[in-house]
Amino acid sequence: MKNHLNYRIAKTKVMQWLVYLLAFLTVLPLVFILIYIVKAAIGAINWDFIVNIPKPVGEIGGGIANALLGTIIILFFATIIAVPIGILTGVYLSENKTGKLSYWVGMCVDVLQGIPSIVIGIIAYFWLVRPLGSFSAISGSIALAIMMLPIIIRSTEETLKLLPNSLKEAGYALGMPSHRVILRIIIPCGFSGILSGVMLAVARVAGETAPLLFTAFGNPFIETNLGKPMQTLPLLIFNYATSSYEEWQNLAWGASIVLLAMVLSFNLLTKLITRKWKIQL
Amino acid sequence: MKKRNLQQIAMIALGLLVSISLTSCSQNGNSDSTNQKVKTLIGAGSSFDNPLFSKMFYEYNKNTGLQINYQSVGSGAGISQLTHKTVDFGATDAPMNDAQEKEAKGNVLHIPITAGAVVLSYNLPTVKKTLNMTPEVIAEIFLGKITNWNDAKIEAINPGVNLPNQKIVVVHRSDGSGTTSIFTTYLSKVNAEWRDKVGAGTSVNWPVGLGGKGNEGVAGIEKQTPGAIGYIELAYAIQNNRPYVTVQNKSGNYIKPSIESVTAAANIVIPEDAKISLTDTEAADGYPISSFSWVIIYQEQSYGKNTEAKAKELVTLINWMIHEGQQYSAALDYAPLSEAAVKRAVEILKKATFNGKAIL
Amino acid sequence: MANEQKIGKTLRMIKGERMFKRSIRLSGILMVTLVLGIFITLFWGAFPSIQSLGFDFFKGKTWDPVQNVFGAYPFLVGTLLTSLVALMISIPFSVAIAIFLGEYFPNGWLSNFLRGTIELIAAVPSVIFGFWGFFVLVPIIRTFQVEMGIMPNGVGIFSAALVLAIMIIPYAASLGTSIIKMVPSDLKEGAYALGATRWEVLRNVILPYSKSGLFAGILLSLGRAVGETMAVTMVIGNANLLPESIFSPGNTMASVIANEFTEADHPLYLAALIEMGLFLFLVTFVINFIGKRIIKKTTNH
């Protein structure tokens, strides 16, 4: 009897350490990636790198200014497009928990979330690039906005659902119409949750390449006109990484670290926001 | 009250910002007036030409301020995007075939812009001497029939070279490529089995091998993979310090790819539409896998949102590329156009019209 | 306030309320329109290919755009192989993390650290995974291949599956953690009271209870793997052939679309690529639908 008990205890210990081992191993790739990228990029980053555009093929030097600016511009406009629609839809879903339309809207949001990014690229190509006759940054922004919508909608909905009903009822009791209740009470209270949803969405699409392949197209020069093709950090990394030129590969490593820094800092900011500005109940 | 004012101000500012940006881009798009200065042109296509174009457009931008956004996406994409009119010009090393010309709905001019060599670069760090290859050997490697570097057939034509016992990793293009077209046209001419089994084109059904995107991708994979052999444009091989094969031509001579051997192969009569293949050249000193590369534009430039000013900038650019632009070829190991080729190119360029009126 | 002013104010409030309700409703309808529009665009774009090739599209083994032969079978196999192998590699790790965070260390600095790390993995853009995979993983795999005496491609189905596995761990892991945390304590305490060891409680109480939730997490991981494009296209070798072994180069549907979309020069070519996009849309839709359904059912208990 005792032996069997010891066996069971031993098994528990073994499985426990197996779980620890596997969990630990999972952390390793991320650590490796970060170390490798930092090592590879550390030589490439300097002020020139940030403010210059890439040099012609085979020449030393150059930088990622066009890609950095392009990423910021495209992300900015994607956010402007996605946030209002996303928040409004999130409000709709949290206000209408039952009902046929609400069910279908919820389904469609789930579908949108699962669509592969390359398919979004195809859609944006047909809806914007073909009719307008040219590749453009705005078509890239719209493709990214479509990808941001489900994230913003869901986090808005979840945040608003967490708020107690008493808040709304207090507002109604005071004679406020529902739009005032939502806009003046509910949304400001859930602001941190909504904001973190937006930031998560931005962080998610900042690194997207596939939808931009046939929309923003790329540009070796700095471009601020939304109607023209633009370069972005992920596109630059994709094109230069698989090339054979060492200068271009260095640019790609540097761009990777800049992109990673952007994405990771957005994620960290989101955490800080949710922690500091907990929903005022 | 204060918060409300702030909110309102923020909304108004946002609205202004959005409307300003939207109008600025629609303003540039609706420029029908001829005094709107053209600042950018967009082109796409051949990665074969990319090293040369990259330099040419950089210099042209320094001289004139015109920004040319050229994306090296492969000749296939260049032709396709020109057909869909999403770019102003394309670049291809494979002239458009009949099916593609039909898709294009409008006559497309092929202006020869340079000539280059498709070389076979290989990754064998232990082999110091440059390898020779015959057409038969090359075809059999890419057919997957010769699979090891120390195969008897390779050893026979490389006496004194210590070839390692290493598997050959074939690298080809994953995208639609003029470079592929040049290479497979050559193989179809010199090897009956290749012609029947695989054929020629910008995208073929490769029997073996890995795919890389663009000349850049093929060079990248070849550089990383011991035992690899891939076909790339000469400039890529030289810029990346890759060894490349000396190929036996039709006359039986082993020719090193270079400006001289490409120029020798390009020394032929160019037909009126300039669509001619230089592969398997008759010239005794000619490199057998050489080719012209062309810039393609619509003959009639008044389509879509094109303005006369833009068409003029485009034609001026191409004219510069044929003349002053050629000075940048030699440093990058592209063969400058011969006088006859330049003459033919100008003739073709002169055919470009805007609303029927010649531009040049 | 005078009566007229009061009535005016009330009317404005009512109008405002109606407008607001209408605008959020409109937003919702916009979502539905968007998804319908996506489906219609894909279907209409793929129609020439569906019409002329039918189901043989997925059985054809040759992809030759120049000869107008479009058989997507190699890419179907490539997609399935990479996704399923990625899933197999990632499941032990995802489940381990779910157990670690859900059962062993639900709170504390270690838990926060690990959870943060997993979220960071999910945040890394896929192009960077592909970049790292090409320069770090591929040479390692190539060295193994040389040792094993097979073609030292480095790139291939296995390499793509490995990179994918790392990328999809966070999805199953985070979902699994929440599911395991939701196991009611009285079930666990009942088992402990009967003398079960920790592992036995895990194996016989917690895991069976969270089975469907874990399964949903795995499904969501699969959905992500099927649609992943950039990291895969950088390490899979881009060979439009049926892979002969796990180490052969191959191609997935998403990767082919990314490679060949801009150069599709005739309508049938473009339609064939879009048909693959439509297929990906439908497959991910089904996978995500089933996954979300299961989650809703389990979280409503």
Image (cartoon, rainbow, N blue to C red):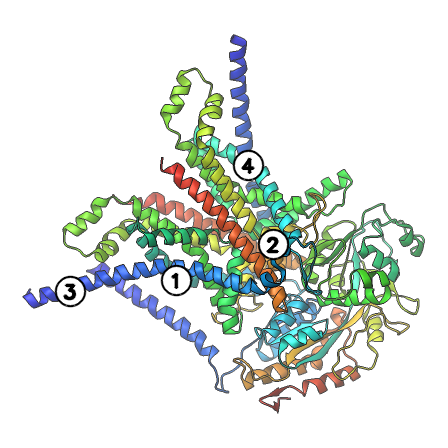
Q: Nearer the viewer, residue A208 or B244?
A: A208
* Residue at the spot of label 4: C91
Please say if the residues under marks 3 and 2 sit with CB atoms less than 8 Å apart. no
Find the distance from the CA under tag 1 to the CA under tag 2. 32 Å
Look at discs 2 and 4 and give the one toward the viewer.
2
Position of C169 relative to C236 (above/below): above
Categorize mark 1 by other alpha carbons within 10 Å: few (<14), some (14-19), many (20+). some
Q: Nearer the viewer, residue C35 or B60?
A: C35
First reached walking from the N terminus: tag 4 or tag 3: 3
Find the distance from the CA under tag 3 to the CA under tag 1. 32 Å
Please identify the quarter of the rendering in which residue B254 is found. Answer: bottom right
Could you tell me which secondary element the residue under label 2 belongs to? helix
Which of the chains bears the disc numbered 4? C
Look at discs 3 and 1 and give the one toward the viewer.
3
> Can see residue A32?
no
First reached walking from the N terminus: tag 3 or tag 2: 3
Q: Are marks 1 and 2 on the same chain?
A: no
Look at discs 4 and 1 and give the one toward the viewer.
4
Q: Residue furthest bottom?
A: B357
* Residue at the spot of label 3: C11
Q: Residue furthest top?
A: A1
Please say if the residues under marks 3 and 1 sit with CB atoms less than 8 Å apart. no
Residue type (three-letter) at the residue carrying disc 3: Leu
Find the distance from the CA under tag 2 to the CA under tag 4. 23 Å
Could you tell me which secondary element the residue under label 3 belongs to? helix
Residue type (three-letter) at the residue carrying disc 1: Ile
- The disc label shown at residue C253, or none: 2
- The disc label shown at residue A236, or none: none
- The disc label shown at residue A80, or none: 1
